[in-house]
Amino acid sequence: MSEAKKYVMTYEGVKKLEDELSFLKTTKRKEVTAKIKVALSFGDLSENSEYDEAKNDQAFLEGRIIQLENMLKNASIVDESEIPKDIINIGSLVKVKDFEFDEEIEFLIVGSAEADPIANKISNESPVGSALMGKKVGKIVEVQVPDGINKYEILSINRP
């Protein structure tokens, strides 16, 4: 049997998943159960689209609960106090100069379970995140991305 994937996360990321899991197990489960009861009251299940939709919602919800429980069970929390502050690691807030767009961008390096590119939280496993890991200020990094090679200069490393 294969070993379960470890999810490297910050304390903040674990807390966010725990909050979502709690919400899904309490509030959301009750909502879906209520939808199923209402749909059952409509009678004939063979032509009851509300029932089918409610059961699909339930299946999705239970799948997400299992996924969150697995992620939390296999979470490895990064102790930010043990990481050198001058080297990029999970939990680092990194300011880089993007040579392609000639602009400065700030990334928070997080584990894959916490990644949110829209919020500039990039995974340590992503092309940019993995290229930045272990580097110091002043280093220029070239990253192979789907549309070519991006070049970044590391300007600063902080902790959020």
Image (cartoon, rainbow, N blue to C red):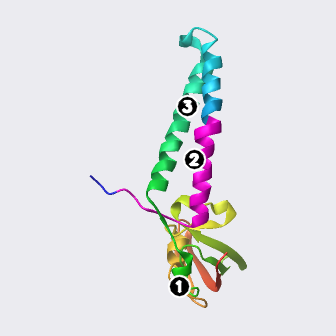
Q: What is the quadrant of the C terminus in the image?
A: bottom right
**Residue 145, x across and y down, in percent:** 53, 69
Q: How many labels sit on residues?
A: 3
Q: Is residue 65 above or below residue 160?
A: above
Instruction: Say whether marks 1 and 2 touch (CB < 8 Å).
Output: no
Q: Is residue 133 left or right of residue 138?
A: left
Q: Kindly report which numbered mark, 1 or 3, lies closer to the viewer in this rendering.
A: 3
Q: Kindly report which numbered mark, 1 or 2, lies closer to the viewer in this rendering.
A: 2
The amino acid type found where label 2 is placed reads Leu
Residue position for label 1: 135
Report the magenta residues as a range: 4-28
The amino acid type found where label 3 is placed reads Gln
- Judge the density around disc 3: few (<14), some (14-19), many (≥20) Cα neighbours within 10 Å: some
Q: Is residue 71 left or right of residue 119?
A: left
Which residue sits at x=58%, y=71%? Answer: 109
Query: Sequence-wise, which precedes: disc 1 or disc 3?
Result: 3
**Residue 111, x across and y down, in percent:** 53, 65
Q: Kindly report which numbered mark, 3 or 2, lies closer to the viewer in this rendering.
A: 2
Residue 58 marker: 3
Q: Main secondary structure of the magenta part?
A: helix
Structural distance between the alpha carbons of marks 1 and 2: 35 Å
Residue position for label 2: 21
The residue at the far bottom in this view is 138
